Image (tube, grey):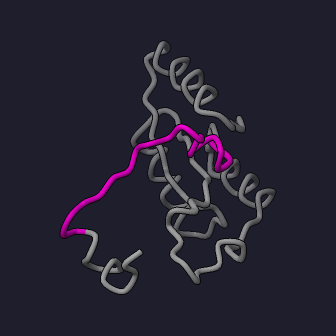
């Protein structure tokens, strides 16, 4: 299993698979894999030639008072579990890679952001 840490790594990996005519399925996660994650990874392997998993604890998903630093992490275990279900690549960027200083992109979805968990998590 390849460990990818930059967007450039992902581009090179996906380009290589595509030039061989392969298909890729991405399973986005925040890590600390459990049976549900592994089932998604296995299902992805049934519909694509190659499975890539992103493992990124996204700080923008945490509101004030929610302790980002306490989010559970076990990178070694996640690697073993992903490899065990046939994942070909694990994309593990750091915050600076995902949100470079010059980043100015934000997405807002009026209406949708206030439903489901957005109702109780306005941030």
At horizontal 59% and vertical 21% (from top left) the residue drawn is: 12
Q: Does the magenta segment cover residue 96?
A: yes
Outermost residue, left side: 111
Q: Quadrant of residue 16?
A: top right
**In screen coordinates, is 74 left or right of 108?**
right
Above-or-below relation of 65 to 111: below
* Quadrant of the frame with the N terminus: top right
At horizontal 81% and vertical 57% (from top left) the residue drawn is: 76
From where the camera sits, is residue 1 visible? no
Q: Which residues are magenta?
A: 90-112
Along the viewing direction, whichever of 95 and 86 lies nearer the viewer: 95
Above-or-below relation of 11 to 120: above
* Magenta-drawn stretch, dominant element (helix, strand or loop): loop
At horizontal 50% and vertical 67% (from top left) the residue drawn is: 61
Above-or-below relation of 62 to 24: below
Along the viewing direction, whichever of 108 and 56 lies nearer the viewer: 108
**In screen coordinates, is 33 left or right of 113?**
right
Image coordinates of residue 101 in percent, x first then y, are 59, 41
From where the camera sits, is residue 25 visible? yes
Image coordinates of residue 123 in percent, x first then y, are 42, 74
Along the viewing direction, whichever of 104 and 60 lies nearer the viewer: 104
At horizontal 51% and vertical 19% (from top left) the residue drawn is: 15
């Amino acid at each position: 299993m390849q460990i990818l840490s930059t967007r450039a790594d992902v581009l090179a990996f996906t380009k290589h698979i595509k030039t061989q005519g392969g298909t890729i399925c991405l399973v986005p996660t925040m890590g600390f894999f459990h049976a549900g994650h592994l089932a998604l990874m296995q299902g992805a392997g049934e519909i694509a030639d190659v499975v890539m998993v992103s493992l990124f604890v996204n700080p923008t998903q945490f509101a004030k008072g929610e302790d980002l630093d306490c989010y559970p992490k076990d990178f070694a275990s996640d690697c073993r579990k992903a490899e065990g279900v046939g994942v070909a690549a694990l994309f593990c960027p750091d915050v600076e890679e995902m949100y470079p200083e010059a980043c100015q992109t934000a997405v807002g979805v009026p209406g949708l952001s206030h439903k489901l968990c957005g109702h109780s998590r306005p941030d």
